[in-house]
Each structure stands twice: as C-alpha cells, then as structure tokens.
C-alpha cells in the first residue's frame, strides 16, 4: 500500500480537528483510498499548549520548513493573507500539493496561487474555504460542471445567521445577540470580519468565480453587513411576511453578472427563511439541472476538518494514480460580459423612515419617490401616543434600479421631517 506523509501548518482549532480525524479514522480512510495517510509533522508557534489530543512528540515542530521539506501533502491552516500566501506559494513551487481553508487569501490572490499550481503541475484544494463541511465547491467543480450557472445565493456566515436568529426568535438586541455569539465561540472578540459582511464576500467571490469562469476582485463586490438591523426591522419584516438574512448573491443578468453581499428580506415559508442558528444554506440554479440546495454546518472544528480531510483524500487518490491536476483548481473560461456595478441592480426595497407626525409627511416622501420613478407597493405608519416623538413609516417599493432608490433616499434624508438615518433592506423574492 502506498503511503503519503501529511504535514499541517497551523495547530489551532481546525488543525487539531484534522489531526484528530486522521488518527481516529485512519483505518476508514485507508480502506476508502487504498492509501496510508500518515500524520507526519505539525508546525505551530506554540507546540506546548494542550489541545486535547495525544501525539508523538516528534510530530510537533516550530519549523515550518521542516514540514514543507518532509511532507507529501501540505495543509495550510494558519489563516491570514501574508505568511500563509508565502507558505502556499513555496509549497507549490516545490511541487507539493496543498490543501487550504483560507477564504480571504483565495478571494484576494486566487489568480496568482492557481497560476503557481498550474506552472508546477500540482494541485491546490480548498473545499473548506466556503461553507465548512458542505461540499459546495466540489459540486461546482465536478457535479455541476456541465451546467450554465444562473444564480447562487445563500447564507454563508454562521455568526450573522446566529445573531439574526436570536433577534427574530428571542427578541434580543443586536448587541446582546452578538455578545451571546461571542460567549459561544461563534463570533470573534473583534467581530467586524463577520458582521460587516467581509467573510461572506470572500466566500461568494470564490463561488461566483468558479461559476462564471473569471476570478472576481472582492474590492469590486458591494459588501454590507448587519450592524444596522434593529429589532424594529425584524418585527416589521415579520409583519410584512418576511425574514431577514445576510446573503451572498451571484446572478447572471442576460450576458452580464452581479455579485453582492447585504441583508435581504426573504419570504417566510421558504426553505432559506427556516435556516437558523449558525447553519449555512446555499442555493445554486443551473441549466439543465434547475435548483439545488446545500445545507449544513458552515464552520467549527468538525465541519471544517471534515472538508479539509476530504481534500486530503482527493489528493491522496491523485498521488496513488499519478494523476495530479485531474481536476484543475480553476479554469479561466470567462463566459459573461461585465460585473455590473451596484447601481445597476434591480430590486424591491424596504424603507424604514422615522418622521415627524404631522400632515403632509407621506405626500412629501411619495412625491420624491415618484419623481425617481419608484412605485410604492405598500406603506404602513404606526400610531404612537407620544406626539413629540418621531414615528416610523415603512415603505415597500415595487422593483426599481438601485441608482433610483439611492437618488430618492438622498433627497428624502434632507427633509426636515425626517429623523435619523433611513434604513434600507433589499427584498429577494427567491423566484
């Protein structure tokens, strides 16, 4: 039986999970691959801290070059976009196949990394970079390879989904729900990568790039997080028959595409609306297959390590049959015109406007909307017994272009009757 030495760089939560699974499930992996995958080396700055796993002391090292030189398969799990990039490029230049879970690095430098792998005739696998243990990248690269992808949308960040679930089900404020997520380990102490939408943007960039055949620059993707979602918005959405989620969206629009990240209102009763807590859900529509839905744990030791080891197994099978690059890590086959700017998207909109309670308010707002060719689908004004306080008006528009709604909001915001910043949430009817 052929053997392959696995070297892990990064011994954090995911690294520990990968090491544990390689040891505990070694017989299963051996039977399914016909390869003996040996956990050879693990490099980390701290090799003294207990991880709850018993290892031969010779496996641990602080010398990452030792891992690169002695291992057959390199697993990068340190994160970040500087040292990790150097490690991956060096491994590829040595002709070593690489597994990574590094979504930020791939989103920003995918083209360079994939070019290095192609030049050296080796592989890089990255299933764990999107949606944890859900095999969505494998599905795009293999199972859906014959399909023209029309749209991808879904919940790609478990932290945000957990926070929005707590707000909707337990009436927790955003701040309280975030604090709870941090206590449970769903959110980092500095949570901006998650709650400001950047993590979701990295993931939808990877999926959209695979779907449409051209590596998309994340700097060109409109990205908005969930900081501005209030309990009032959650309540009004429910009254209107909607649930609020943070979505990554990629769609084909005739010959062009759009890629964006922001909160959306989606209809209650849809499957996506029922995906709660820290779970992920991704919908992919292609031709000829139609719609497919992927659901499961999007992060954490178990889910992410499962995806990492699936990639290790794919590489091991390649090594067994001397068939590297059987599946290209990325194929540059751009089949769309341009990436549309945000102002060109077409959507329905929810607007929450806090106004002075006086005659003529609705007329002033609707006049501005009308001048920008925005039609009102519904309008609700809640009564209040405190005449000195602003009252919320909620408007749902018919479909219009983003540039139109932004022009209108800029004008409405300047009205003396308007208090606070107007809150806007886009509506996705999932049709």
Image: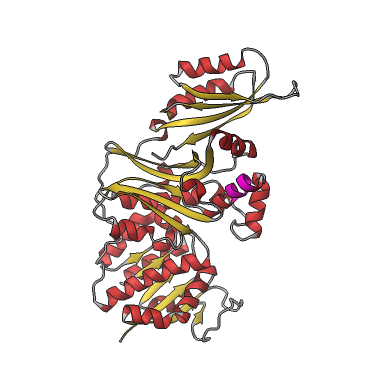
Q: Quadrant of the N terminus?
A: bottom left
Judge whether 201 appears above or below 380 on screen: below
Is residue 187 shown in magenta?
no
Q: Residue furthest front?
A: 269
Q: Residue 364's x, y, as percent?
A: 57, 14
Judge whether 162 appears above or below 14 on screen: above
Judge whether 319 appears above or below 100 on screen: below
Q: Residue at x 45, y 21 (%)?
A: 374
* Secondary structure predominantly adopted by residues drawn in magenta: helix
Report the front residue among 248 and 291: 291
Q: Residue at x 24, y 50 (%)?
A: 333
In the visual, does 387 lie left or right of 196? Answer: right
Residue 324: name its quadrant: bottom left
In the visual, does 125 lie left or right of 304? Answer: left
Q: Which segment is the magenta one?
A: 163-169
Q: Quadrant of the C terminus?
A: top left
Q: Total label count?
A: 0
Q: Residue at x 58, y 49 (%)?
A: 165
On the question of residue 96 being in view, the answer is no
């Amino acid at each position: 039986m052929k053997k392959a030495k696995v070297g892990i760089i990064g011994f954090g939560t995911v690294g520990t999970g990968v090491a544990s699974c390689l040891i505990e499930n070694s017989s299963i992996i051996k039977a399914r691959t016909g390869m003996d995958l040996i956990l050879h080396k693990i490099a980390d700055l701290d090799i003294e801290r207990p991880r709850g796993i018993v290892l031969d002391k010779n496996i641990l090292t602080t010398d990452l070059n030792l891992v690169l030189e002695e291992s057959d398969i390199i697993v990068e799990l340190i994160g970040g976009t500087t040292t990790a990039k150097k490690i991956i490029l060096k491994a590829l230049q040595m002709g070593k196949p690489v597994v990574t879970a590094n979504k930020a690095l791939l989103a920003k430098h995918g083209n360079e990394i994939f070019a290095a792998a192609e030049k050296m005739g080796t592989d890089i696998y990255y299933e764990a970079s999107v949606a944890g243990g859900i095999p969505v990248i494998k599905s795009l690269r293999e199972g859906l390879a014959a399909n023209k992808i029309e749209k991808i949308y879904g919940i790609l960040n478990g932290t945000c989904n957990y926070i929005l679930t707590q707000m909707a089900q337990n009436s927790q404020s955003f701040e309280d729900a975030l604090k709870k997520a941090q206590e449970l380990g769903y959110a980092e102490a500095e949570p901006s990568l998650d709650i400001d939408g950047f993590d979701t943007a990295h993931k939808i960039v990877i999926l959209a790039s695979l779907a449409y055949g051209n590596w998309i620059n994340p700097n060109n993707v409109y990205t908005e997080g969930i900081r501005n979602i209030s309990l009032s918005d959650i309540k009004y959405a429910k009254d209107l028959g909607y649930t609020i989620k943070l979505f990554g969206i990629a769609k084909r629009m005739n010959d062009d595409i759009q890629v964006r990240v922001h909160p959306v209102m989606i209809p209650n009763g849809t499957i996506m609306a029922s995906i709660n807590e820290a779970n992920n859900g991704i919908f992919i529509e292609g031709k000829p297959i139609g719609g497919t839905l992927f659901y499961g744990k999007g992060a954490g030791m178990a889910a992410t390590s499962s995806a990492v080891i699936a990639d290790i197994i794919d590489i091991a099978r390649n090594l067994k049959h001397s068939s590297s690059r059987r599946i290209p890590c990325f194929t540059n086959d751009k089949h769309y015109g341009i990436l549309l700017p945000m102002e060109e998207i077409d959507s329905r909109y929810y607007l929450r406007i806090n106004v002075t309670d006086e005659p003529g308010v609705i007329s002033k707002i609707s006049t501005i909307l009308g001048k920008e060719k925005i039609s009102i689908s519904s309008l609700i004004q809640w009564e209040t017994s405190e005449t000195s306080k602003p009252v919320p008006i909620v408007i749902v528009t018919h479909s219009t272009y983003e540039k139109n709604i932004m022009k209108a909001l800029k004008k409405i915001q300047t009205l003396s009757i308007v208090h606070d910043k107007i809150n806007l949430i886009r509506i996705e009817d999932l049709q």
